[in-house]
Amino acid sequence: MALIPVHWWTKEVHSFQISQDKFKKQPWANGVVLLSCVVVAMLLANLPFTKVLYHNFLHTELTIHIASPDGLVNWFFPRGMTMEKFINDILMVIFFFTVGLEIKREIVCGELSSFKKAILPVIAAFGGVVAPALIFAVINRGSLAASGWGIPTATDIAFAVGILSILGDKVPVSLKVFLTALAIADDLIAILVVALFYGGSINLPLLAVALAVILFVALMKRLGEKRVGFYMVPAIIVWFLFYYSGIHATMTGVVMAMFIPMEARYHKAKFHRRAKILWEGLIEAETVHTAERFPNGPERYYLRRLSSLTFKTIPPSYRLEHKLNPIVNFAIMPVFALANAGVEITDPSYFNVFKAVDPALGSVGMGIFLGLVLGKPLGITLTSWLAIKFKLGEMPQKATWPMLFAVACLGGIGFTMSIFVDTLSFVGPDIDPELTQQLRDAGKIAVLLGSLCAGLLGSLLITLVAKLKNKTDSI
């Protein structure tokens, strides 16, 4: 067998890494990875030789059991933790932490930083939440499925923005900014919905301790602490307190993200002053030790100092967001999709979202599908029209109402947050666990179908509106 030359192998590995980096930088890459994971999850959950292994793996217990021989000590920590709950209650904390950082950035210095910038997307996001919730509530009123009204209210920013990037210049830049800001505001509303309506019974003493820890973190930030490590230990403590107090544990990520400093340890003038001193030292070290290989000992010292200086001049919030985004997009979200999109199709009628409404169970599929495909665009467009008519907001530049409606259809891509809310829904004393699982499985299928149809409908309408506009302009 012929040996592969080392230089050929290293060249191929290097080119693969470059291609991988280019792929990750594409705005649609996250959506492609998530869709692939959905397909894999559905196969794992339904193929005869993998479905048992798949479900057993998700229900594997991860609880630490500490017991003494005399039986006086018998602790389970954390109680009830499985692989599925680990993904949904621990890994998703990192996702919500990143979302919190993005929301904070947009509020402080982005598209939500002023009343004029924020008002139209916020009003539109509110309409895009209320309309699908109402549609779901009307269809499922008085049924066991009524608690799932929050499922069709979310917008998946990754998919929506990814599709806009693929469509290129067919959509005005102002509408791309509008949809991005709307999705961020929508995330914030979805977080509030989860925190207020999808937690358990509240343990007030534990919640009071959690609030005391949060106040301590706020005081620490107020005193000017900018080292990220000092915020991590309180975050872990708050997670445990939320987990056992009835507040959904993922809210820890959002709450703690709000306290991560957006101010750098070194301000601009101090950075320039120190950088100049270090640069002059680096040049001097080079002229003194010209015979030595670069970088020599003194040069390495100044380079390390420059590296430390630039690191501390970037605010902690930006550093964390930059580091966590690839991890969230290409590790945590795919794992979440693999764990939650795998629905075992025991009842093919799940795919018939328009099946007759059952008075007792309700019609989860119809409520979610119509909420995403109709409720989202109608709610976004109607509230935007009202805001502009009453001069609360301004129409995005170079935008038309047909194009705004077409873009609003992309708001119906619920996917990640909708599936997450689905995993929290349909719990109560009147619903047995088996029925809960059936409702959740039907909900997940409806989320996937509704998100797919919303994406296709939005893309088709954007293409048609752009073509009509080009024809009109050419006349």
Image (tube, grey):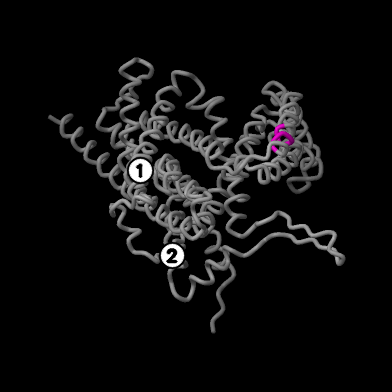
Residue extending furthest bottom? 1
The image quadrant where one finds the N terminus is bottom right
| Marking on residue 75 | none
**Residue 275 visible at all:** no
Dominant secondary structure of the residues highlighted in magenta in the image = helix
**Residue 40 coordinates in the image, percent (x, y):** 45, 64
Cα–Cα gap, marks 1 and 2: 23 Å
Q: Quadrant of residue 173?
A: top left
**Residue density around tag 1, few if under 14, some if 14–19, many if 20 or more, within 10 Å:** many
Q: Toward the viewer: 451 or 321?
A: 451
Vertical placement of residue 370 versus 73, above or below? above
Q: Residue at x 34, y 64 (%)?
A: 348
- What residue does disc 1 label? 372
Q: For the magenta stretch, what is the residue range?
A: 207-211
- What residue does disc 2 label? 344
Lateral position of residue 441 relative to residue 349, left or right? right
